Image (spheres, grey):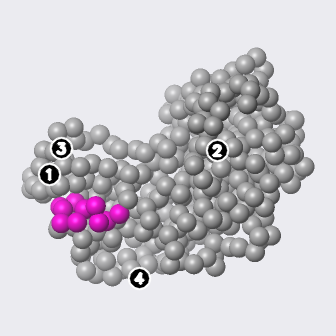
Amino acid sequence: MANEATVPVVIVGAGQAGLSVAYYLRKFELSPGRDFVIFDRGPDAGGAWQHRWRSLRLGAAHRVNDLPGMAELGISFDTADRSLPAREIVADYYRRYEEHFGLKVVRPVTVRSVANHRADLVVSTTSPGYGDRDTTARLLVNATGTWGSPFVPHYPGADRFAGRQLHTAGYVSAEEFAGQRVVVVGGGTSAIGFLLELEGVGAELSWAARRPIDWIHTELLELEGASAAVAAQDEAARAGRALPSIVSGTGVPVSRRIAAGIDRGLLVARPMFAAIEPTGVRWPDGTFTEADAIIWASGFRPELRHLSPLKLREKAGGLSVGGGASWTDPRIFLAGYGPQASTVGAHRAGRTIARQIVALL
């Protein structure tokens, strides 16, 4: 293949947000491969879900909403087999979705940078299939999500810890920690899931969270709490601030399994430790816990490094985004950013962004 190409629109990422935008572009009579191209870094369909740990199942805490038009295929995540790994279900459904709508996703492709080229954009990519390549585009939809940008906060002594440290993105299975003393850090559903899986496998478990856990005593997220969290994300995105944590605005729904864990005394979070020492963690009250491993379930940040040549970041730490469009550069759209991060948000954002793109072409 040639080392240069030109296409009106480039979509970066084929997760829920990227596929939603592509669906609506196609619905508005733009042709995949001719009018727009989708670059995806993953080796297969499924977005970030294909990289999640095998024991993770679909459920109230990890719910996936259907993509627009998915009903045409006769499949729905609401009726999916919950005994199977979530990553397998999502990958299968997304693969069938891409094929059904002929979206022609190009993978595996890593977008290294997006830079200005006169009035257009040049998207520099690399791939095992065709090496380095530059694609010139009028508009770009960034739908890279957060999985590729894990966040691990700095704590004194972390570099001296003699045991193993890993982030959610590196977690594979509880069996890796058999017989070990494990500290899990984080206040969201991933941290809770790890603790429930590690119970009876690890020799000793400790849970640390930076803020008190806001338990919501319902298995489903209340609409009011979800709406407030989305509004907070939207306000921060429009102001160009760093995005707040979703769980800090919604709380954690208490399923029967979680309620049982609380009753057993397993799911009791301690205030964040004050320091990490070579053999464990030191708590604010001066007590010490020996540890063989620390799992950082501390969340992710939007993956935006490849956009740095465009200088979109504001002094407040984030990007100014409203309605899925950059307020700094009208050629850039950010699908799945801020209030659009949920699967419901991605659905709506896909339609909104596609309409704006068609108006500009």
Quarter of the C terminus within the rendering = top right
Whether residue 137 appears in this view of the structure is yes
Contact, mark 2 vs mark 4 (Cβ under 8 Å): no
Relative side of 123 to 361, left or right: left
Q: Which residue bears the numbered disc 3?
A: 161
Residue ID for mark 2? 107
Q: CA distance from mark 2 to mark 4?
A: 40 Å
Q: Earlier in the sequence, mark 1 or mark 4?
A: 4
Separation of disc 2 and disc 3 at Cα?
38 Å
Q: CA distance from mark 3 to mark 4?
A: 36 Å
Q: Earlier in the sequence, mark 2 or mark 3?
A: 2
Segment tinted magenta in the rendering: 173-182
Q: Nearer the viewer, residue 185 or 294?
A: 294
Label 3 amino acid? Answer: Phe
Lower sequence index among marks 2 and 1: 2
What residue sits right under mark 1 in the picture?
280
Magenta stretch: includes residue 176? yes
Say which of 233 and 39 sits in front: 39
Give coordinates of residue 76: x percent, y percent: 68, 73
User: Is residue 208 rendered to the left or right of residue 56?
Assistant: left
Residue 123 place in picture, x, y as percent: 67, 29
**What residue do we see at 37% from left, 56% from top?**
171
